[in-house]
Amino acid sequence: MTPSQLLLEGVELMLFGIGFVFAFLVLLILCIRLMSYLTGRFVSAPEPQLAAAPVTIADADTLAAIKAAIHQHRARRG
């Protein structure tokens, strides 16, 4: 084979590879959009969550313990 034939064969192979990757990516995007559409259509939306309960005495004690533990941890690390 001459160098020009090898170059043309290489370009042909490169274009085939680029085309294959492009087709695969287009198919992947279409599948993802289809799945998104089907998920949105058949899965119900989550119910809104209720407001958080007010902090009670036990929760305040727990919160104070957590804050103390974080402070102690940060003091050890320097």
Image (tube, rainbow, N blue to C red):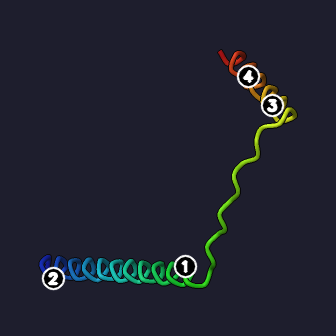
> Residue 32: x and y, percent?
48, 78
Alpha carbon distance from label 3 to label 4: 20 Å
- Amino acid at dot 1: Gly
> Could you tell whether 23 is left or right of 34 in the image?
left
Q: Are the residues at dot 4 and dot 1 in contact (C-beta closer than 8 Å)?
A: no
- 56 or 35: nearer the viewer: 56
Q: Which of 24 and 74 is in front in this view?
A: 74
Number of the front mark, 2 or 3? 3
Mark 4 and mark 2 residues within 8 Å of each other at the beta carbon = no
Residue 20 versus residue 73: which sits nearer the camera? 73
Nearer-N-terminus badge (2/3): 2
CA neighbours of label 4 inside 10 A, class few (<14), some (14 to 19), many (20+): few
- The three-letter amino acid code for the residue at tag 3 is Ala
Label annotation for residue 5? 2
Label for residue 40?
Answer: 1
Q: Which of marks 4 and 2 is in front?
A: 4
The 10 Å Cα crowd at callout 3, few under 14, some 14 to 19, many 20 or more, is few
Q: Mark 3 points at which residue?
A: 60
Q: Give the residue number, with chain letter if any, for mark 4.
A: 73
Q: How many angstroms separate mark 1 from mark 2 (CA)?
A: 52 Å
Secondary structure at numbered mark 4: helix
Q: In this view, does 53 lie to the left or right of 25?
A: right
Say which quarter of the image contains residue 75: top right
Q: Residue furthest right?
A: 58
Q: Residues within 10 Å of mark 1 (few under 14, many from 20)?
A: few
Three-letter code for the amino acid on which mark 2 is drawn: Gln
Q: Where is residue 25 in the image (x, y as percent from the top left)?
A: 39, 77
